[in-house]
Image (cartoon, rainbow, N blue to C red):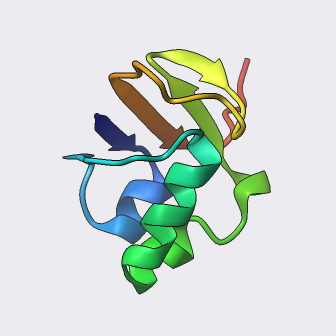
Amino acid sequence: MDVLYFAWVRERIGHPRERVETGAATVRDLVEELRAREERYAAAFADLTALRVAVDQELADFDAPLSGVREVAFFPPMTGG
């Protein structure tokens, strides 16, 4: 699946997207796999309350299933008017 990173998440990880082979059942499981890769991922995913996630371009929560998913995006909460 494609994993996309936006704003400060992208800055901490060092690239905007990557292709990930995973057996993760949920977004939370995917985050745990990514955290275990190296320190920059651990730093980016240290506080999940500071992140939002979209699964196939639909807002989701971290318990969302990944079966059949093509894209997961991580980004900080958005504000504005």
* On screen, residue 48 above or below 60: below
Q: Is residue 15 left or right of residue 49?
A: left
Quarter residue 38 falls in: bottom left
Quarter residue 75 falls in: top right
Q: Is residue 46 or residue 80 the one in the foreground?
A: 46
At x 59% / y 39%, what residue is drawn?
26
The reply to whether residue 17 is visible in this rendering is no
Looking at the picture, how far across and down is residue 18, in whole percent? 22, 48
Residue located farthest toward the bottom when viewing the structure as drawn: 39
* On screen, residue 34 above or below 37: above
Q: Is residue 30 left or right of residue 1?
A: right
At x 46% / y 76%, what residue is drawn?
36
The reply to whether residue 32 is visible in this rendering is yes
Work out which quarter of the rendered image holds the N terminus and state it: top left
Q: How many marks?
A: 0
Work out which quarter of the rendered image holds the C terminus and state it: top right
At x 48% / y 46%, what residue is drawn?
24
Looking at the picture, how far across and down is residue 40, in whole percent? 41, 78
* On screen, residue 59 above or below 46: above
Q: Is residue 9 or residue 45 the one in the foreground?
A: 45
At x 72% / y 37%, what residue is drawn?
63
Looking at the picture, how far across and down is residue 27, in whole percent? 58, 41
Residue located farthest toward the right when viewing the structure as drawn: 49
Q: Is residue 22 or residue 55 the one in the foreground?
A: 22
Q: Is residue 27 left or right of residue 39?
A: right
Residue located farthest toward the left when viewing the structure as drawn: 19
